[in-house]
Image: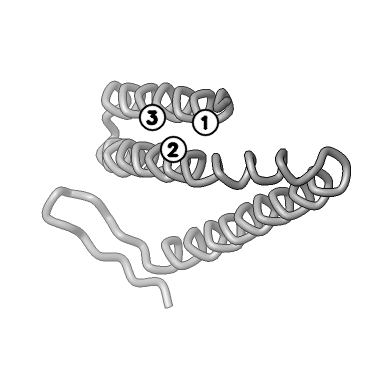
Amino acid sequence: MNRERQTETGLTQNAAFIRGAYRKAVVTGMLSILSTNINVFVDGILLGNRIGEDALAAINLSMPVYWVLCVVGSFFAAGTEIPAARAIGVGDATRRDAFSARGSTLRWWFHWSSHSLP
């Protein structure tokens, strides 16, 4: 069933499109989380066996800081994607580009700051 609804801001909501986009995003997100967890698990096994217990302990102690930086970066990314999507919906290319640029800059900064942990 393809129901379209007009919002107060002039955007058109298409239920079938939203369901399809959500399904794609959920599968992609789940695969991303799964691959990250497998990577952490394999790294832990390799470090524990090859380098020793101290290296494994150091990695495990730094993981909470890494995850906090990843979560904050995700918050900024989602916070810029929502207004960018609204700008796309109303056809405002200038605002869309501004929000996309800000989001990309913030994601890049948090990505590199999380990978430069000691």
Say which quadrant the C terminus sits in: top right
- Depth check: give the residue in front, 21 or 63: 63
Real-space CA distance between mark 2 and mark 3, rounded to the nearest whole angstrom? 15 Å
Q: Which residue is mark 2?
A: 69
Do callouts 1 and 2 mark residues in contact (Cβ within 8 Å)?
A: yes
Give neighbour class at mark 1: few <14, some 14-19, many 20+ (Cα, 10 Å).
some
Q: Is residue 23 above or below residue 107?
A: below
**How far across and down, in percent of the image, does residue 94 sit?**
29, 21
The residue shown at (75%, 46%) is 53
What amino acid is labelled 3 in the image? Gly
Q: What secondary structure is marked by label 2?
A: helix
Find the distance from the CA under tag 1 to the CA under tag 2: 6 Å
Judge whether 111 appears above or below 11 on screen: above
- Residue 97: image x %, image y %? 36, 23
Q: Mark yes or no: residue 82 visible.
A: yes
Is residue 70 left or right of 31 when viewed as pictured? left
| Element under disc 1 | helix
